[in-house]
Image (spheres, rainbow, N blue to C red):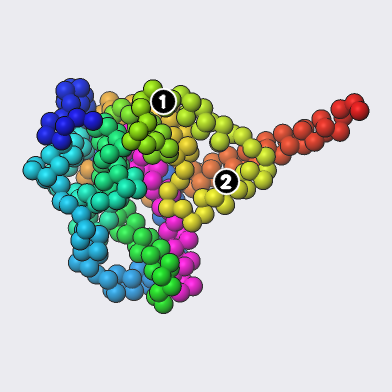
Amino acid sequence: MSDDNTPTTSGADRARARRILTDIAPRAWEHPADKAALSALRKLPVFDEVLRKLFGFFGEKPIRLAFQANAVKVGPDQYPRVWEIYQDVLRTFDVDREYDLLVSQTPLVNAGAYGMDEPFIILNSGTLILLEDDELRYIIAHEVGHILSDHVLYRTMTELLIALAQMGFPIVGIAARAVLVALLEWSRKAELTADRAGLLGTQEPDAVMNTMLKMAGGSPRTHGHEMSLDAFIEQADEYREGGDVADQVFKILNLMGQTHPFWVLRVSEIRSWIDSGAYDRILRGDYPRRGEPDPAYQEDLREAAQAYADGARDFFDQMAGAAKRMSESIFAGFSKPK
């Protein structure tokens, strides 16, 4: 990594090459499954009641204090290298508002965007140790994407409900637990939206996927030549396509209770988005602008529903393929001469 006071020359050169996404609307990068899951969440009969009780109990100021009490606010004189990267991300998204960015002394490599009316971003200190400048830019752009897509209210709600459930707090009854399950489903889909924003903020696909590789299993002692992005992509393909029926079921069960999808799945999703041509179209300036009317509501819902249908079809295709491979293996065993 470069010294905290000066960005790397190569990083500055790349910053000049990045396209400023003037007036870009968040729906340009939002994942259809994110929209579908949020639509399903809002249809829960108890959702509004739980939301009102939770934030009526806490309020805006206590939420900010709870997250920010043990963190350092980033600025021109406090983590100046991180501040410069953050400013570059805001310029890339053509955002004229600054959200508080803080560093928390936490070895776990992670980050988050939280709040209600006043969003803010928390970077864990372990993230700064592990990642290079271009990789850190992806993490910051990812979190800015959450804010621009209005994810922070529901993400904050998810974190609070998880914490209250772990403490056995009485506010978390059966209704709130049902909301939490739906929130976790939406949260995993929302990460796919933010990953796309992270790519647009860096405009370097390899840097994004290398970050995912490091987040999955890197360490400060790992040198670049000891990790292979190609091997990780191959691992992601094997995970998505391989396994028998039991493996496919366990893949689903392993995700339950998780706020984020697994990194190998996220690599596959971002590669699919790039391959679709949508990423290149945005860089060419072909994207919806802020202030332009949204697409017809029903058309938007159809797109979201189609994404869910495609996801379900993909899952059942995998199950069928796994079952076929398992049966072939069984019959092959019976047919072997003794």
Dot 1 alpha-carbon crowd within 10 angstroms: few under 14, some 14 to 19, many 20 or more? few
**Vertical side of 25 occupied by 56: above or below:** below
Placement of the N terminus among the 4 image quadrants: top left
Dot 2 alpha-carbon crowd within 10 angstroms: few under 14, some 14 to 19, many 20 or more? some
Q: Is residue 265 left or right of residue 285?
A: right
Residue 220 visible, this orientation? yes
194 part of magenta stretch: yes
| Name of the residue lying farthest toward the front | 221
Residue type, label 2: Lys
Which of these two is toward me, 311 or 12?
12
Is disc 2 placed on a helix, strand or loop? helix
Placement of the C terminus among the 4 image quadrants: top right
Where residue 10 appears, x then y in whole percent?
Answer: 20, 22
**Mark 1 lies on residue:** 226
Residue type, label 1: Glu
Is disc 1 placed on a helix, strand or loop? helix
Where residue 244 appears, x then y in whole percent?
Answer: 67, 39
**Mark 2 lies on residue:** 251
Q: Residue at x 73, y 37 (%)?
A: 326
Of marks 2 and 1, which one's residue comes earlier in the chain? Answer: 1
Residue 40 visible, this orientation? no
**Vertical side of 71 occupied by 225: above or below:** above
Span shown in magenta: 172-201
